[in-house]
Image (tube, rainbow, N blue to C red):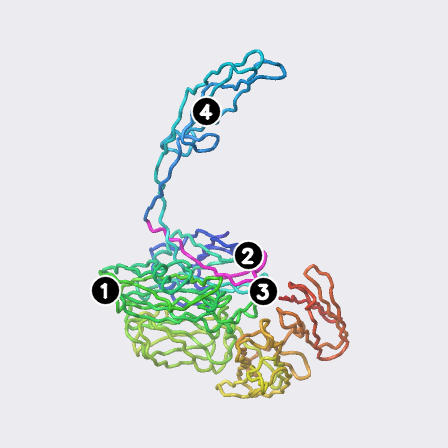
Amino acid sequence: MKIKLLSLFASLFCITLIAGDTTTVRIHDHTDMTWYGNYDAWGELPDATKDYRKVYLNYTMGCATGGCSDWDYTSQIFVRHRTGEIDSTLETAPLFTVNGTITDSINYSSDSTYLHFWDTITNTIDSTLHTHYEIIEFNDPNNPTISTDTINGWMANYYNMDFDSLGNIIDSNFVSANTSLYLTDYTWYTAYDVIENYELARVITPYGSGLANNWEFTTVFDVTDFIQILRDSVEIRCHYSGWSSGFSATLDFEFIEGTPDRDVVKLENIYSGGYNYISSSDFEANKLTPQTKFIEPNSSQAAVKMTTTGHGFDNNASAAEFKPIDYFVNINGTLTHTQYNWDSDCGENPIFPQGGTWIYDRANWCPGKRAQAFNHEITPHITGGDSIELNVDFQSYSWGGTQTPSYIVECQLFQYEDANFSNSAEIIDIIKPSLKDEYSRKNPICGKPLITIRNYGSSPLTTLDIEYKVVGGTSHTYNWTGNLAFLESENVELPNLTNWSGSENTFEVILSNPNGQADDYAENNTMKSEFENVPEYPETFALWVGTNGGVINTFTQESETTWDFYNENGNIEFTSGSLFGNNQYRDTLSFTKGCYTFIMSDTDEDGLDFWANNDGGGMVRFREIGASWLKAFNADFGTNIIHQFTIGSTETTTTVGQENNWEIYPNPTKNILTIEGISDQKTKLTLQDNLGKIILERIITKSGFNSETINLEQFENGIYFIKISNFKEEITKKVVKI
């Protein structure tokens, strides 16, 4: 486990926040999480001598050393805050033990004792030595668990018999004890620091069966409000709720100097832990009970941060994992917020394809994605120096089954001083163009940039000038209008750039003139993001589509899947219209110079191939006329494919390499595997198990496009390898049978 401290002027992962030095501290460096439990590490964060306007936690999840787990498990990141309070536990220790056992008392002889008996062989009296007691004494009140002496004692308080010459018992003698010990206990208190665990992040692991061992994915969390406890030496806990190996955790904390939107006065946990849902009445009465909290005299604002995920579904209600419900925030008996606790975009997961049921929407999570933390402002309902009753209720439902549904709930109350600025805007994020893992489905682009702005001042934000450009290229200005209250944010789609050429592949955004005035705090007005260019395709190419058996109408056999090409103005250039299930389509398309967006949508949100249904496998590809593939899309895409490209508008040309000339799908697969590609010579297909044993071979002699299917039904579930070889190339690809 490594701890790294780096001083940087740019944040990680290709996003740069201009103005304000940045200090980055790594705590946990590829820490393997291989079994259920806690993985703790200490690090040295910046002290309180400087102010920070932003603190980010970059959580990079990867495969463990031995590879990724096949299952979706919960991972949580906590800061273990020493409160400064001391508690204690009553401890006891005995005065002595006898042969390692605690006894109420013991009577013994300090001298050896013997048992007399008549020896029938020699016809004489004989005796045997009693086995001694080992008595360990603890006589040091200052160190009551450390032994002070070891004493040997022998059995006493018994009778020895006297015998005549014939061996008859004629008398007895009492062997008395000369020492007695009676048990007493030493009592004392063991003091310990009171530690509170505050959740900073929660990410559910993906179904990792099909992920390469070097797979990594970074999720960024804003943890600015935890600044009070992210100081100096801290202990950071990675909690892993998995029962098999595994995943790894790398945590990078970024501290950006400057003034925050408001200063935190106090933070405290309200609810923290996992709670079984038996009934609504039990949940409210015993799990999420109302909490009374004191509002500090200098607190003028407050917010409740709530992160809850539902787990378990072996019951009639499919709860809690697959049941969409609301929760309700009540302050002093008044309902202040209703929150829909559901993630409806699992089919747009940026980590795809996966094994398992990755496309199914869930109770505020998807496999591989963050759990959303909901922020509920309660400022109108507090008064400094007074108390509030905070109560969170869950929408009631009835369940029956063998697996009790449960919720992991982390709820925190933050108290703040007044806003530090009145008239100010902030650039929060650049979604497009971006290299961030979380936005990989939306990128790269040649069309309209997408950014997130936020009102950083107490006055409503109604107008804003947004300048944007590729560094070294032509600058554009967009005049935004709206109405954002303090700390409200909005995603803003900017008009198209006239071109994406510049001195470097870096996109820059500069905010100015909020509400037509100078910004009270301009340190957070500028952001840059690195990007990659979209591919450039020839003016004419072919679209190859093979639909699967998924249909929206069994009578008409109309497919769930459709496609469209949009030009840079957002108008449809080409459209599929209605397609039909289990059909092959070949369309030759001609474009003029410009930026285009290809969107393929599936109404059932299960793509053209998904292992858990019976739709079969489809495919979608771009092919250069008379040549090789331009782009092969993964058929297991969930909700949609969004792909931007240019025609004759950039100097960057992307062509598919020789390896990408062959497509293997679906992968993972239940039984049927399809191998397609273009070859001008005899090609051998070889199927090997994970030990390298050849279990199937096939020869392709046809020139041009080839499509071969292999039935894996006879083989066990696991990892296999397909080798495609001829005189020009040799390609090996991993295949997973599930």
Q: Which residues are magenta?
A: 59-84
Residue 62 falls inside the magenta stretch:
yes
Q: Are marks 1 and 4 in contact (CB under 8 Å)?
A: no
Closest to the observer, 679 or 146 = 146
* Residue behind mark 1: 383
Q: Please tell me which residue is depicted at 30% across the width and 79% down the height of the picture.
A: 516
Q: Residues under labels 2 and 4: Cα distance?
A: 49 Å
Magenta residues, dominant SS class? strand
Image coordinates for residue 528, horizontal then vertical, percent: 44, 71
- Identify the mark nearer the N-term, 2 or 4: 4
Residue 449 drawn above or below residue 241:
below
Q: Residues under labels 3 and 4: Cα distance?
A: 64 Å
Q: Nearer the viewer, mark 3 or mark 2?
A: 2
Q: Are marks 3 and 2 in contact (CB under 8 Å)?
A: no
- Identify the mark nearer the N-term, 1 or 4: 4
Residue 257 visible in the displayed image = no
* Residue behind mark 3: 211
Mark 3 neighbour density, 10 Å: few (under 14) some (14–19) many (20 or more): many
Q: Quadrant of the C terminus?
A: bottom right
* Residue behind mark 2: 244
The amino acid marked with disc number 2 is Ser
Closest to the observer, 627 or 99 = 99
Q: Please tell me which residue is depicted at 51% across the width and 64% down the height of the picture.
A: 217
Q: Please tell me which residue is depicted at 25% across the width and 59% down the height of the picture.
A: 296
Mark 2 neighbour density, 10 Å: few (under 14) some (14–19) many (20 or more): some
- Identify the mark nearer the N-term, 3 or 4: 4
